[in-house]
Image (cartoon, grey):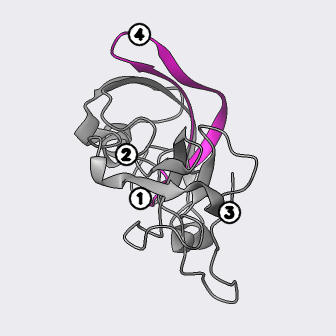
Amino acid sequence: MKITEQCVVALTWTLKDTLGEELDALDEPVEFLVGGNDLLASLEKALQGHEAGDSLELQLEPHDAFGDYDDGLLFLEPRHLFPEHLEEGMGFEGLPEGCSSSAPKDRLFFVSDIYPDHVVMDGNHPLAGIALRIRLKVHDVREAEVSEIGRGTLGTGFFRMQVDTSGSGDEPPQTPTLH
């Protein structure tokens, strides 16, 4: 089966920066919904028409990957609003209660810097502003189930920085949580 809109692909990859430094490797195949929210649009476009066994090598400029770095997504927040145990790189779904009201509530934020009285929170994807080289291997392609299409995702979040804060159906909305 060839990759088209509304199908599921099982992929592995090696992700490098333009200097050749490996940033991420996915050694075991993981399924992603094509035509949903799981993959970058540039990856979906490149995968169209390919089938199991195919490999692709792509160079993605920041605008085709995780976007340019946006200084407007940096927030200096009071240290006391965060858990006692806090490390650089920790992630939060949204910011804790009492933080900047102008911060988007549907984003993942990462602790960038910790000071005695303040914490710098960064809502940019960790790979924002970086040109990337990615080698993809397609391991399997199958038709997406109606329930998968309805959700718009298989739950794989590597390529997304937004979280669902609306809730759906009988499930309550998500609250910001520590990762």
Q: Residue furthest top?
A: 20
Label placed on residue 44: 2
Q: State which mark lies toward you, 1 or 4.
A: 4
Q: Residue at x 75, y 52 (%)?
A: 84
Query: Which span is picked out in magenta?
Result: 10-38
Q: Residue at x 43, y 45 (%)?
A: 3
Q: Secondary structure at mark 4?
A: loop
Label placed on residue 145: none
81 w.r.t. 74: above or below: below
Between 77 and 26, the one lying in front of the other is 77
Q: Secondary structure at mark 3?
A: loop
The chief SS type of the magenta part is strand
Would you say residue 35 is visible in this rendering? Answer: yes
Q: Of the residues shown, which amino acid type is indicated by label 1?
A: Gly
Q: Of the residues shown, which amino acid type is indicated by label 3?
A: Thr
Instruction: Tell me, yes or no, whether the highlighted magenta stretch contains residue 33.
Output: yes
Q: Are marks 1 and 2 in contact (CB under 8 Å)?
A: yes
Mark 4 = which residue?
Answer: 20
Q: State which mark lies toward you, 2 or 4.
A: 4
Residue neighbourhood size for the residue with mark 4, other residues' Cα within 10 Å, grouped as few (<14), some (14–19), many (≥20):
few
Q: Is residue 135 left or right of residue 95?
A: left
Residue neighbourhood size for the residue with mark 2, other residues' Cα within 10 Å, grouped as few (<14), some (14–19), many (≥20):
some
Would you say residue 8 is visible in this rendering? Answer: no
Q: Secondary structure at mark 2?
A: helix
Q: Are marks 3 and 1 in contact (CB under 8 Å)?
A: no
The mark nearer the N terminus, 1 or 2, is 1
Mark 1 = which residue?
Answer: 35
Mark 3 = which residue?
Answer: 177
Q: Of the residues shown, which amino acid type is indicated by label 4?
A: Gly
Q: State which mark lies toward you, 3 or 1.
A: 3
Q: Residue at x 53, y 47 (%)?
A: 110
